[in-house]
């Protein structure tokens, strides 16, 4: 660190910003955790605008200006051999020999990066005396109260963490997803798939209907057999009864479909299954028509 008194910084551009009697300047930060390395070099004596040093001849000090580094030659001629390094922008050089006719200058490096000496063109140089820094004014800053700053930070943090009691209750009353139970993941059911309990109930009802139809048909068969006891048990081929569903001859056991048509037991089961399928399809078609009407009404 370098301590500079305020009295020696009166003509410095930053003197207006100094409030204390002394100012501390960090020159080398390589030994700290800041990671900035070396920040300041010792100011050369040729810098006349620096109040800490005596006034000198400013005409000999030049600054490299432009957008890119400058090529340095070992001789006065432009076709002379070039130096490997370039002279960086912002470097300060001292004039050893000045040739206005050829537009070149033989310099000695005072501050910056590049060759220690060499020849450069005057087009990329500017005298320090022609561009003297101006003192800048700094806007006055209102004093900040530490307590007010802490209170503002506290209110800013609470603004993002504040939650109403209603929102907390809504979050706590949320139910789990329908396919999760006791932490065990289950595959979600299809949206149009019927529930297993309803399917089982429909199957039981269907079996009961089949049982009732078969009992009724068996009762009608017994009545028919009782009424035909007085007739001859041996009929001719022309008088043989046939099944109304498949057309094959009937045996001793048959059923009456809708009270008129005689059918086999197997044919009776097939007829009842077909009727049940037809009723189920009609029910599904009716539900689809109702859904379509609702969509057209609300859309």
Image (tube, rainbow, N blue to C red):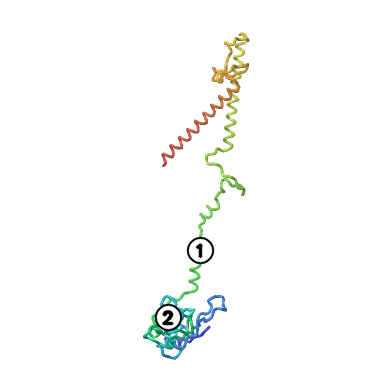
Which residue: 56% across, 77% down? 32
Q: Position of residue 22 (x, y in %)?
A: 49, 85
Q: Which residue is mark 2?
A: 79
For residue 75, side relative to residue 222 (left or right): left
User: Where is residue 143 drawn, in percent x and y?
Assistant: 45, 76
Q: Residues within 10 Å of mark 2 (few under 14, many from 20)?
A: few
Q: Residue at x 58, y 29 (%)?
A: 206
Identify residue for label 1.
Answer: 158
Q: Inspect this view and state whether residue 295 appears.
A: yes
- Vertical relation: 96 (above or below) 69: below
Asked if residue 69 is positioned above or below residue 43 in the image, the reply reads above
Using the image as rendered, state which of residue 32 and residue 120 is in the foreground.
120
For this rendering, which residue is in front, 136 or 58?
A: 58
Disc 2 is placed on an element classified as loop
Judge the density around disc 1: few (<14), some (14-19), many (≥20) Cα neighbours within 10 Å. few
The answer to whether any part of residue 10 appears in the image is no
Compared with residue 183, is residue 230 higher up or lower down, i.e. above or below?
Answer: above
Where residue 86 sits: x, y (%)? 47, 78
């Amino acid at each position: 660190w370098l301590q500079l008194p305020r009295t020696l910084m009166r003509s410095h551009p930053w003197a207006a910003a100094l409030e204390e009697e002394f100012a501390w300047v960090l020159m080398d930060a390589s030994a700290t955790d800041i990671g900035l390395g070396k920040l300041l070099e010792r100011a050369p004596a040729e810098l006349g605008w620096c109040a800490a040093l005596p006034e000198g001849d400013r005409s000999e000090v030049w600054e490299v200006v432009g957008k890119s580094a400058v090529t340095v030659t070992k001789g006065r001629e432009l076709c002379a051999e070039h130096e490997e390094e370039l002279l960086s922008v912002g470097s300060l050089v001292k004039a050893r020999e000045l040739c206005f006719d050829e537009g070149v200058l033989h310099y000695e490096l005072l501050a910056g990066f590049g060759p220690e000496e060499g020849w450069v063109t005057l087009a990329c140089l500017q005298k320090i005396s022609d561009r003297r820094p101006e003192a800048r004014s700094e806007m006055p800053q209102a004093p900040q109260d530490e307590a007010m700053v802490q209170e503002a930070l506290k209110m800013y943090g609470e603004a993002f963490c504040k939650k109403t009691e209603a929102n907390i209750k809504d979050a706590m009353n949320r139910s789990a997803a329908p396919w999760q139970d006791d932490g065990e993941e289950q595959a979600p059911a299809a949206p149009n798939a019927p529930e297993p309990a309803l399917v089982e109930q429909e199957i039981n009802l269907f079996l009961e209907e089949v049982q009732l139809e078969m009992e009724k048909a068996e009762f009608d068969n017994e009545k028919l057999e009782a009424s035909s006891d007085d007739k001859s048990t041996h009929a001719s081929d022309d008088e043989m009864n046939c099944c109304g569903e498949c057309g094959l001859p009937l045996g001793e056991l048959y059923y009456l479909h809708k009270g008129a048509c005689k059918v086999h037991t197997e044919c009776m089961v097939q007829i009842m299954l077909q009727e049940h399928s037809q009723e189920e399809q009609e029910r599904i078609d009716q539900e689809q028509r109702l859904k379509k009407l609702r969509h057209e009404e609300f859309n």
